[in-house]
Image: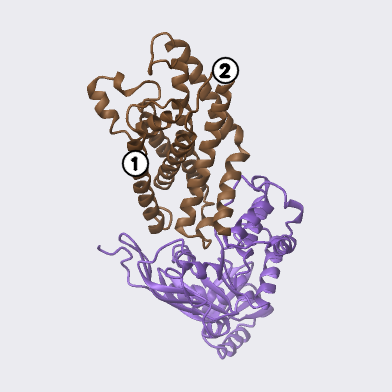
Chain colours: A purple, B brown
Amino acid sequence: MIPAIEVEQMHKRYGALRVLAGIDLKIEPGEFFALLGPNGAGKTTLINIMAGLTRATSGRARVMGYDVVSRYRQARRMLGVVPQELVFDPFFTVRETLILQSGYYGLKNNGAWIEEIIHHLDLADKADTNMRALSGGMKRRVLVAQALVHKPPVIVLDEPTAGVDVELRQGLWRFIKQLNREGHTIVLTTHYLEEAEALCSRVAMMKQGNVVALDSIRNLVGSVPGCSVRLRLSPDTLPPALQPLMSSREEGCYILALAEYSQLEQVMAALRKAALHVLEMQVLQPDLEEVFIRIMGTHKIRKPEILPV
Amino acid sequence: MTGFLTLLYKELLRFWKVGFQTVFAPMVSTLLYLLIFSHVLEEHVQAYPGVAYTVFLVPGLVMMAMLQNAFANSSSSLIQSKITGNLIFILLSPLSYREIFFAYVTASVVRGLAVGLGVYLITLTFFDVPLSSFPWVLMFALMGSALLGAIGVIAGIWAEKFDQLAAFQNFVILPLTFLSGVFYTIPSLPPFWQGLSHLNPFFYMIDGFRYGFFRASDISPYVSLGIVATCFVAVSWLTLQMLKRGYKIRH
């Protein structure tokens, strides 16, 4: 099967600054995939190269098998990108914006689909309103609509929920999930790790232009050994034997980090020995956020980000 | 073809939606030039024998308005799209660099012709300006507007800020149009300025365009057309290369 997205040895430099340092990535059709990483990790640059907005220094990228440089027309028809920034053309209404965007892709008589997206993204009330008059959330919806106007098999969303209220966020994900069920490949970047955990099957974590982890969420979360325990005690003191395990204190609770589940026994024994009364106890399993912090922390990539030219 | 036509339609709609500013305002300012210069100079200057100064002035002013507006259209559209970021909608689409080029240039030509035609029709109600060869007039109008539309694309791509574009307009386009013989004939100038004027491609556009009205010109309209066409081909080639490489727009 032809991968939805295939990136090989992708390098990008701006002068002495290395933004992408040899990315290899393959995303299969129908996947719900997240690109995670701190600001400046190179996520947007990678997306921009796939979309043809940025030119790679070296390496290749293909969308549904079409090279993004040599066969850019086909590649761009396969790809819908929701950009990170809230951009709009102040000369036009929502419907005009969508009709024009559809026309750029060479589509005629696309009205029925345009009306359907307007309906799905709750834009019907604002369809004939000028773009200038829309709120930020509404402008975001129009950007999503614009990315879908040519029914692309691959949809890339670059931080689609940044600064978006809860209601819209949920509505947006409902629609995106539906598109994924219908067979569209979804690639997103987000800073909300719980979103990635809830939606995606696979993630790539990027740091300083490298992919430092690439796996399913289950495997990544499973790779973190142990668990943490949340305790509320009476009297409110932690036995000295347990002090080394304490990772933090919040709202009158002690959080202990355990390397293995078997350590739970030691904890219980120490509590019994100190004759402490347990008011509350919770065993917390690692989540994607913890994996993220571990991977970002441990992967000390060779320091010089600025290379001599 | 649909992609190209859509972008062209969008570019036409863009200036038409603000038509007061993009079409009617330049018509008014051009007519003001006509009013003032004809009043001051009517008695003193005779460019061509038997042609009143005001009548002589009309084709030059029409051409100047066309050139300035053709330039303004593509350059301001591009820089606005770049600065507000909505150029991305075009860059993400499968439109080829040639389609982008021709759409912007054609829209510039349409705006140039709209302004020029408007000015000419209004002056006709006051003065009798003969149009002796429509093909020459049309040819120079098209070539001149297209050339300035292409230069506008270059300026719009090159400029990163509005003041850079304004500098291009005020320090390049405006002097070249004002010193191209709109208000005088070149033989009336001292030899040094005559020589300099012949290096100005805008001079050939004005001179050739005027030939279509009076059958009189400083140099042969064939030579002028050849020079303007050569300039257009050269500038278009440069613009296409910039767009193909994504100069300043695909980083």
Which amino acid, by three-letter code, is at mark 2?
Phe
Residue displayed at 47% across by 17% down: B54
Residue A237 shows in this picture: no
How far, Cα to Cα, is label 2 from label 1? 34 Å
Most foreground residue, A108 or B141: B141
Nearer the N terminus, badge 2 or badge 1? 2
Residue A256 shows in this picture: yes
Most foreground residue, A268 or A17: A17
The residue that mark 1 highlights is: B226
Residue displayed at 73% across by 61% down: A115
Crowding at mark 2 (Cα within 10 Å: few <14, some 14-19, many 20+): few
Which circle marks residue B106 in the picture? Answer: none
Label 1: element kind: helix
Q: Picture coordinates of residue A299 (x, y %)?
A: 40, 75
From this view, report whether residue B14 is shown above or below residue B31.
below
From this view, report whether residue B116 is shown above or below residue A61.
above
Left or right, A169 with reference to B236? right
Left or right, A213 with reference to A13? right
Instruction: Say which quadrant the C terminus of chain A sits in.
Output: bottom left
Residue displayed at 33% across by 65% down: A305
Identify the residue at the far right of this view. Answer: A125
Q: Quadrant of residue A242?
A: bottom right
